Amino acid sequence: MKNIDKSKDKISNMFNSIAKHYDFVGHLLSLGIDVGWRKKTIKSLEINNQTRCLDIATGTGDLAIALAKQNPLSIDAFDISEGMLAIAQKKAKKKKQLEKINFIYADAEEIPFPDNYFDVITIGFGTRNFYNYKKTLFEIHRVLKKGGQLRILELTLPENKFGKLYFFYLYKVMPFIADKITHAHFYKYLPESIHDFDQGMVFMNQLEKSGFGKGQISRYSFGITTLYSVEKCTVLSGVNDVVKDLKRDVKIYNNAV
Ligand SMILES: C[S@@+](CC[C@H](N)C(=O)[O-])C[C@H]1O[C@@H](n2cnc3c(N)ncnc32)[C@H](O)[C@@H]1O
């Protein structure tokens, strides 16, 4: 892994500086497909009026708002960027979902909730930015109930012919357009952070080591985004034979668009 500075101050300042442009630029650069990726994430979950949900690194709140529309028992949503949280609250109010969501300032490395508390945890495009994502996975395991559902949506690099074209877009076209709009250098960080991050089976193995199993990898839009779907297992899979057992469960779906 490269030495990208992902300290809490650097990350929160960076997201504070782009908060007001985040949604517009995100939809523009993904040509609006990001809306569909989040919809698929919510659709993959089983939610009823007894479900306690947590959206980690909620940003401008899209996943939290989508969860609220499923009418679960409760939704907590947190982030380390106050700028992003402010936009999330405004948006939730506009969509008449604010009273259902408890937005708070918190760090994924120290989740301010008790053990075995949530039934569902979502993270949309946040994991890649965590200072120490491996430590964070253990923290998520702690607050999720046994059998609880974890969904991690993350930007990935296509492992197919489309990859070269996407690299050009990611490194050349996208930073140029985005920096013109935001005047921030975040969009140089973006490709590096995607390139640098564990993906596919490497990431799934890390989830297994942190005590999650029954894994499913769903690649969307030629592989530029991946949804990792897992459940909390009873045992932490540090023991070799448990890791083997869990691996047999991993299903991979390559869905184009
Ligand atoms: C790319 S945005 C994603 C926002 C939103 N989830 C979405 O689907 O668009 C990443 C978010 O992760 C947040 N973040 C990064 N590190 C964090 C941490 N350690 N704890 C909580 N939030 C964090 C950032 O502040 C930022 O709002």
Image: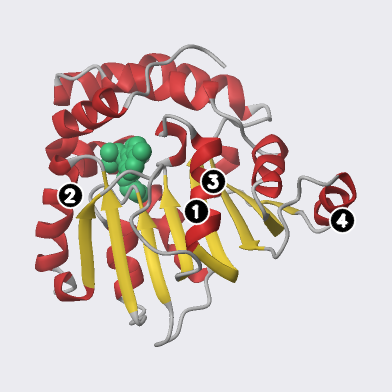
The reply to whether the C-beta atoms of the residues labelled 2 and 3 are less than 8 Å apart is no
Calculate the distance from the C-alpha at mark 2 to the C-alpha at mark 1: 20 Å
Tell me how far mark 4 sits from mark 3, CA to CA: 20 Å
Q: Which residue is denoted by mark 4 in the rendering?
A: 245
> Could you tell me the amino acid type at mark 3?
Leu
Dot 2 or dot 1: first in sequence order is: 2
Q: Position of residue 143 (x, y in %)?
A: 47, 61
CB atoms of marks 2 and 1 within 8 Å:
no
The Cα atoms of the two marked residues, 2 and 3, are separated by 22 Å
Does residue 17 appear in the picture of this structure? yes
In this rendering, the label closer to the viewer, 2 or 3: 3
Q: Is residue 186 left or right of residue 165?
A: left
The kind of residue on which mark 4 rests is Asp
The numbered dot on residue 85 is 2
Which residue in the structure is indicated by mark 3?
Answer: 137
Res 140 label:
1
Nearest the eye: 9 or 113: 113
The image quadrant that residue 234 belongs to is bottom right
Give the class, few, some or many, for how many residues have Cα within 10 Å of label 4's Cα (few <14, many ≥20).
Answer: few
Q: Is mark 4 within 8 Å of ligand 1?
A: no
Q: Nearer the viewer, mark 2 or mark 1?
A: 1
Horizontal arrangement in the rendering, residue 170 relative to residue 58 (left or right): right
- Amino acid carrying mark 1 in the image: Ile
Relative side of 187 to 14, left or right:
right
Label 1–label 3 contact, CB within 8 A: yes
Q: Residue at x 80, y 59 (%)?
A: 249
Return the disc, 2 or 3, that comes first in the chain's sequence: 2
